[in-house]
């Protein structure tokens, strides 16, 4: 095309830039005709001829010769964790009101935990050495160090049980059409929330009832 003017009507790819595809099974003169490169008979000529991944020729697969390891407990609960230094940070930022009882909904609205809390919130003790805010807080679980730090600062903590339904009503009340009654724990949960060492709400209710009986 030397000497010719370039235009949209005569643009073309450089020589050798492309290759013509070989079409299989289009006659012996097509370089891949007759059996189309698959040979004679056998599984290789079928579309599903390849063995599946990890297939070991019929013998026991390798992954089945190895012992099982670990265990997944379907009843285990995954709590979102919050540390004391997280509480201090949002208190200083003014995103939490220390004059009222801080609940898990307050923590979610303040951005301390995400919006997809699955089983509840557990309070941990990181930053306990510098924690000095006398707050009242309610969470699902709490570590011993977190309980001690809050009470040393002049505050109080209560661990409260929620099931899936009551937790949804607590965190996102607009998602529930009618009020939900307080869920009653069972099994290990009942034991946990009845233990005063865990500051369980059932233990506090029992202490109130006993004090009222003594007054009467």
Image (cartoon, rainbow, N blue to C red):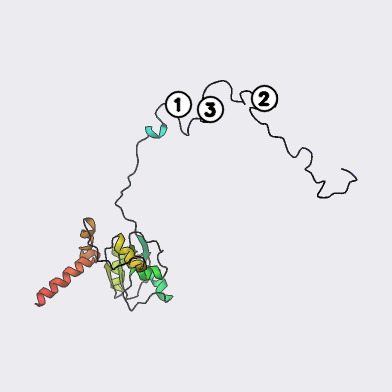
Residue to which mark 3 is pinned: 46
The picture quadrant where one finds residue 71 is top left
Determine whether, in the image, residue 159 is placed left or right of residue 25. Answer: left
Q: Residue at x 14, y 74 (%)?
A: 211
Name the one closer to the observer, 46 or 158.
Answer: 46
Determine whether, in the image, residue 50 is placed left or right of residue 73. Answer: right
Residue to which mark 1 is pinned: 57
* Residue 145 pos. (x, y %): 30, 65
Q: Quadrant of the N terminus?
A: top right
- The reply to whether residue 85 is in sight is no
Q: Quadrant of the C terminus?
A: bottom left
* Residue 30 pos. (x, y %): 69, 26
- Name the N-terminal-most of marks 1 and 2: 2
Q: Residue at x 80, y 46 (%)?
A: 11
- Name the N-terminal-most of marks 1 and 3: 3
Q: Nearer the viewer, mark 1 or mark 2?
A: 2
C-alpha span from label 2 to label 3: 19 Å
């Amino acid at each position: 095309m030397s000497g010719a003017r370039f235009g949209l009507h005569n643009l073309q790819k450089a020589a050798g830039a492309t290759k013509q595809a070989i079409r299989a099974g289009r006659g012996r003169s097509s370089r891949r005709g007759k059996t189309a490169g698959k040979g004679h008979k056998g599984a290789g000529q079928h579309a599903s001829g390849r063995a599946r991944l990890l297939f070991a020729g019929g013998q026991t697969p390798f992954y089945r010769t190895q012992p099982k390891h670990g265990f997944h407990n379907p009843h285990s609960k995954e709590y979102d964790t919050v540390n004391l230094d997280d509480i201090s940070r949002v208190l200083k930022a003014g995103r939490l009101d220390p004059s009222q009882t801080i609940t898990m909904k307050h923590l979610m609205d303040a951005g301390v935990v995400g919006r997809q809390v699955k089983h509840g919130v557990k309070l941990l003790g990181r930053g306990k050495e510098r924690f000095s805010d006398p707050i009242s807080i309610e969470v699902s679980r709490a570590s011993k160090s977190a309980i001690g730090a809050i009470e040393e600062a002049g505050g109080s903590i209560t661990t409260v049980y929620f099931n899936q339904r009551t937790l949804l009503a607590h965190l996102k009340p607009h998602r529930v059409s009618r009020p939900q009654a307080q869920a009653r724990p069972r099994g290990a949960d009942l034991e946990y929330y009845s233990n005063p060492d865990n500051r369980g709400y059932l233990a506090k209710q029992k202490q109130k009832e006993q004090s009222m009986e003594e007054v009467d």
